[in-house]
Amino acid sequence: MEKSALVYIVLTLVTVGFGFCVRNSGATAVLCLLAGVSACRIAVGGDYWVYWLKFQLIDQGRHVSYEKGFVGLVKLFHWIFGEGSYLPIFGFFSLVTVFFFLKALHDQADWYVVSLFLLLTQGFYFNSMN
């Protein structure tokens, strides 16, 4: 079995376990686990290198065809963490994306833990990294 598949299987089991405790402190643990794995993806997904290249172009002060707010956030992260620090940028956007996934589940799901299980096992979360 591939190591990444093992990470995803263990992540799914642990996250769904915390999902049963979502009314208590489980929601924070679920958010941290999913955002942490998503943030640490290096060279995962078809768009990773596209964003990495655009971050470099922003570092160089060159024009990129992205929203001004996105470019501003990338510049802010480069100012805080230094040029070439891409993991904090991916981490921030991973945190935001996972937050909205989980907020939607919390607000709309009749049974949170089953919806979380489906999010993970049907590939929606893992495909979001691509």
Image: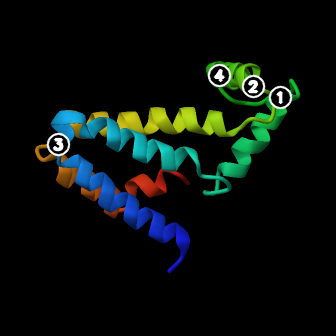
| Of the image marks 2 and 4, the number of the one nearer the N terminus | 4
Distance in Å between CA atoms under marks 4 and 3: 32 Å
What residue is drawn where x is 29% and y is 33%? 103
Mark 2, secondary structure of its residue: helix
Give the SS element for disc 1: helix
Q: Amino acid at mark 2?
A: His
Could you tell which of marks 4 and 3 lies nearer the N-terminus? Answer: 4
**Element class at badge 3:** loop
Task: Determine which residue is flagged by label 3.
Answer: 109
Left-right relation of 29 to 88: left
Whether residue 41 is situated above or below residue 81 in the rendered picture: below
At x 83%, y 28%, the residue is 59
| 102 versus 113 height, above or below | above
Residue 125 percent across, percent down from the top left: 41, 52
In the rendered structure, which amino acid carries the disc numbered 3? Ala
Q: CA distance from mark 2 to mark 4?
A: 9 Å
Tell me where residue 98 appears, x and y as whole percent. 41, 39
| Residues at marks 1 and 2, CA–CA distance in whole angstroms | 7 Å
The mark nearer the N terminus, 3 or 1, is 1
Q: CA distance from mark 2 to mark 3?
A: 38 Å
Dot 4, how many residues are within 10 Å of its Cα: few (below 14), some (14-19), or many (20+)? few
Q: Earlier in the sequence, mark 2 or mark 3?
A: 2
Residue 60: x %, y % from top left:
88, 28
For label 2, the residue is 78
The residues bearing labels 4 and 1 have C-alpha atoms spaced at a distance of: 12 Å
Q: Residue at x 72, y 47 (%)?
A: 50
Q: Is residue 64 left or right of residue 12?
A: right
Judging by the rendered image, the residue that carries numbered circle 1 is 59
> At 20% across and 40% down in the image, what residue appears?
22
Q: Do the residues bearing badges 1 and 2 touch, measured as CB atoms within 8 Å?
A: yes
Q: Pointer 4: what residue? A: 73
Q: Nearer the viewer, mark 2 or mark 3?
A: 2
